[in-house]
Every structure is written in C-alpha cells, then in structure tokens.
C-alpha cells in the first residue's frame, strides 16, 4: 500500500499573487511562487504534502474550502489578505474544519492602519503568525507539523 502523507493546504487571498511587485517595503520582494517553492521543500523535509491555492475572489476561496473539506485535510495555512478584516463568509467556511488552521500575515497587522487590527478569524483559528514576512508560512508549517506529531 502507498504511504499517504498528511496534506496541508496553503491558501492565499486577494492581491497575494502580486507579492514581489506589491508594496515591497511592506510585503518584501519574494513572489508567491518563490515563497511556495521554499515552503514545499520544507514540507517534504518533514513528511507533509502541501497543496497551494490563491484567488482574488471570496466565493472561489469558499468553493475551494468546500472541496478540500471532503478530503479531511491535516491542516490549513491561510493568509486571507484583506478578507481577514471583512469576511464573515470566510470565517463561516473555516468553521467547517476540525484540523488545525494557522492564520498568517506577512506584515504585523496591529502596527498598521486601525481597520487592519481586526481579524474576523482570530478567535476561530489555532493561532496567528504576524509580521515575519515569508518566514511566517514556515513557522505555520512547523506549528502544524509539531501538532500532528503530538497526536
Ligand atoms: C496581509 C495584511 C492584510 O491587511 C492585507 O490586506 C493583505 C496582506 C499580510 O499578509 O500582511 O493583503 O494579509
């Protein structure tokens, strides 16, 4: 029988496809592809399988969540971009899952404009990682890896 690795979904929301070009002083110079490639290497090293998804559309992200719900994923890493601050629908969609969910932001949203201080997901995710740039995705992966090893 094939050895199936636990799958973790990495989901990025609106405008994160523009990383590298978008406000590099805030979000850095790495593209989303570069970030994802490095994360994939790290995941292989700890025996996890990653799936990557990005959309600029709230409904398309919800459709994706409904699709992956059926797969019973081992974990979710999500940077919802601006949907973080507005989307009850995304919150409700994530409430479907019992696996660990880590919310990542490249920037520290609490050091920025007041409208970014509120996360609609803060109280339903396992934890948030803010302000560490692309390294935040690695920290989230590490957290999920540790949690999976503990069960
Ligand atoms: C972001 C922070 C959000 O406020 C913003 O809308 C983004 C990126 C971050 O990664 O720092 O698109 O989620």
Image: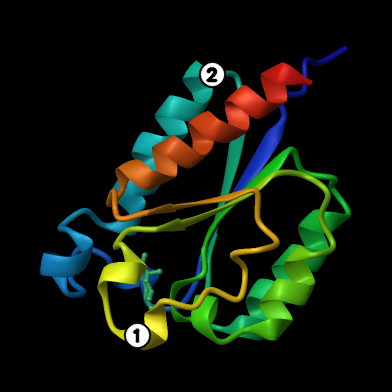
Establish if 26 lies above or below 144.
below
Could you tell me if the residues under marks 1 and 2 are in contact, i.e. CB atoms within 8 Å? no
N-terminal-most mark, 1 or 2: 2
Q: Nearer the viewer, residue 75 or 32?
A: 75
Please indicate whether residue 26 sits to the left or right of residue 19 in the image.
left
Asked where in the image residue 31 lies, by quadrant, the reply is: bottom left
Residue at coordinates 64% horizontally, 73% vertically from top-left?
61
Establish if 76 lies above or below 142.
below
Q: Which mark is residue 73?
A: none
Residue 53 placed where, x, y %? 55, 60
| Residue marked by disc 2 | 46
- The residues tagged by marks 1 and 2 sit, at their Cα atoms, a distance apart of 38 Å
Residue 78 placed where, x, y %? 55, 58
Please indicate whether residue 110 sits to the left or right of residue 87 in the image.
left
Of the four image quadrants, the one with ligand 1 is bottom left
Q: Which mark is residue 114?
A: 1
Residue 83 placed where, x, y %? 53, 80
Q: Secondary structure at mark 1?
A: helix
Q: Nearer the viewer, residue 14 or 113?
A: 113
Q: Secondary structure at mark 2?
A: loop
Q: How is the image coloured?
A: rainbow
Which quadrant: the C terminus? Answer: top right
* Residue at far top of view: 1
Residue 25 placed where, x, y %? 11, 67
Residue at coordinates 32% horizontally, 58% vertically from top-left?
106
Residue at coordinates 81% horizontally, 66% vertically from top-left?
66
Q: Is mark 2 within 8 Å of ligand 1?
A: no
Which quadrant: the N terminus? Answer: top right
């Amino acid at each position: 029988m094939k050895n199936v690795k636990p799958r973790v979904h990495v989901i990025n929301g609106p405008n994160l496809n523009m990383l590298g070009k978008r406000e590099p002083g805030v979000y850095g110079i790495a593209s989303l592809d570069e970030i994802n490639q490095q994360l994939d290497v790290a995941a292989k090293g700890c025996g996890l399988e990653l799936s990557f998804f990005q959309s600029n559309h709230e409904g398309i992200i919800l459709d994706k969540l409904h699709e992956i719900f059926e797969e019973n994923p081992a974990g979710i890493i999500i940077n919802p971009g601006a949907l973080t601050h507005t989307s009850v629908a995304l919150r409700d969609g994530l409430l479907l899952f019992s696996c660990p969910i880590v919310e990542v932001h490249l920037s520290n949203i609490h050091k920025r404009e007041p409208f970014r201080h509120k996360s609609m997901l803060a109280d339903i995710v396992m934890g948030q990682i803010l302000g560490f740039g692309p390294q935040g995705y690695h920290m989230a992966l590490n957290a999920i890896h540790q949690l999976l090893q503990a069960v």
